Image (tube, helix red, strand yellow):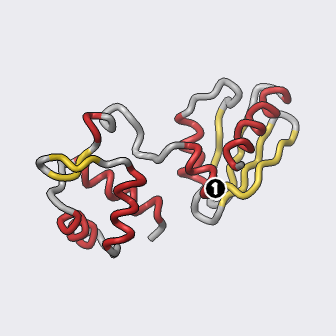
Amino acid sequence: MSKLLRQKTILALLEQGPIASQEDLQRSLHKRGVKVGQATLSRDIRDLGLAKTSVGYAFPQGDHASGSALPPVSRLVREFVVDVRRAQNLLVIKTTVGSAQPVAAALDDEQWPEAVGSVAGDDTILIVCPDKKSATRLAARTQEMLA
């Protein structure tokens, strides 16, 4: 299972309420078919910014209630995007296999004015921009996240 899917599963479990310990979280993940070691689980907890409270692991002070189940767009772009190419008013973004849809969802969540909409396949995202200038700005913004 990919890191992104594993972390989304962790977030889904926490939406049901706090989880008392890493061991309980690991057991809950195993019940969902996700086998994960303690070190990897610790990194996931840190990456997701989860808080250890008196009742267990939870979203930090209601932070997640209004947010998306996706990691920050800059992190997704840095980890999964391999190439950004502009073609007139379009952007074609190549990702690692299986990563295009979550990256596109995170980009869509940003609601940037340069993007009219996007379509994602398995490893390619097509973003439609209103004009060439917007496509250039959006390509530059995405390239900055890669650096």
Q: Residue at x 26, y 34 (%)?
A: 62
Q: Is residue 90 above or below residue 55?
A: above
Relative to the observer, which residue lies in front, 16 or 129?
Answer: 16
- Residue 104, position in %: x, y? 59, 45
Q: Read off the residue under disc 1.
A: 121
Relative to the observer, which residue lies in front, 22 or 70?
Answer: 22
In the picture, measured across the screen, residue 34 lies left or right of residue 123, that is left
Q: Is residue 140 above or below residue 9?
A: above
Q: Secondary structure at mark 1?
A: loop
Q: Residue at x 48, y 67 (%)?
A: 2
Query: Residue 135 is drawn in which quadrant?
Result: top right
Crowd band around label 1 with a 10 angstrom C-alpha radius: few (<14), some (14–19), many (20+): some
Q: Residue at x 72, y 41 (%)?
A: 144
- Residue 77, position in %: x, y? 62, 49
Q: Which quadrant holds the N terminus? A: bottom left
Q: Is residue 36 above or below residue 79?
A: below
Amino acid type assigned to the residue bearing label 1 in the image: Gly
Q: Residue at x 82, y 47 (%)?
A: 85
Q: Is residue 133 above or below residue 51?
A: above
